[in-house]
Image (cartoon, rainbow, N blue to C red):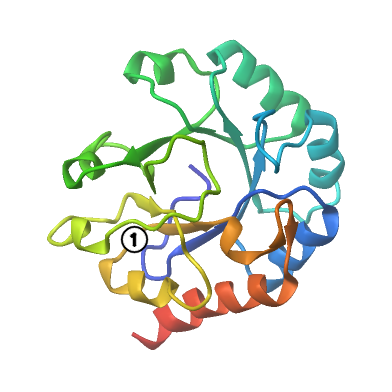
Amino acid sequence: MGWFGDERVPRVKICGITRIEDALVAVEAGADALGFVFYEKSPRFVTPQAARAIVEQLPPFVERVGLFVGRTPMEVEEICTRSGMSLAQIHFDVDESYFHALGIKALPVVRAGAPEDVMTFEGRYRLVDAYCEAYGGSGKRLNLEWFDGIDCGRIVLAGGLTPDNVAEALPYGFYGVDVSSGVEAKKGKKDPVKVRDFIAAVKEGACAR
């Protein structure tokens, strides 16, 4: 996957993008990936057309990640094509056969409610988030102790991360970190200062280690 490479500095994904100004702030601050939510019940929902309008104004080499809930592989592929996504984030319970049916690269999401859950899809790059009834952007934190002694090089950590606490995750060697509500001014609108501070905390913190 284009997003997967150098392991020294965690990749940063800013999720829940709904506006071009938020996307550009994130990219200029050093975000590696932007997330677009194609789940109608989310306050951060965007249509494929709206996402495409943002994507067309982005510079090259930025990963565009579509978040999906309850969609068939065919629907995911169709929406990704229309919106210009380069990766699909599958944010609901599926098995390996689902990924085999997809014609686009995909990142499974593990909604962890217990320590053993973090090993789900162990052989894959995966995003691990805190379990909640809703899908994504809840701001609920995971217990970092669940990752003690685990190779986190294929895990993207999500759930309750902010500019003030993300440094706590850096010693675990996560492949990447994902933030949405932790850098918002309000749901669906990013706070540019928080976005810049979050990315700086990751990039500069990792280089200082």
- Position of 159 relative to 83 (above/below): below
x then y, percent, for residue 205 = 43, 82
- Position of 103 relative to 144 (above/below): above
- Position of 161 relative to 165 (above/below): above
Figure quadrant of the C terminus: bottom left
Residue furthest left as drawn: 149
x then y, percent, for residue 95 = 33, 19
Q: Is residue 32 visible to the viewer in this orientation of the structure?
A: no
Q: Is residue 66 left or right of residue 52?
A: left
Location of mark 1 (residue) = 174
Q: Nearer the viewer, residue 84 or 115?
A: 115
Q: Is residue 114 left or right of residue 9?
A: left
Residue furthest bottom as drawn: 208
Residue visible at 67% across and 35% down in the picture: 85
Residue visible at 16% across and 42% down in the picture: 116
x then y, percent, for residue 101 = 46, 12
x then y, percent, for residue 159 = 44, 54
Q: Is residue 25 left or right of residue 41?
A: right
Q: Nearer the viewer, residue 40 or 158?
A: 40
Q: Nearer the viewer, residue 133 or 78?
A: 133
Q: Is residue 96 left or right of residue 196?
A: left
Q: Amino acid at mark 1?
A: Phe
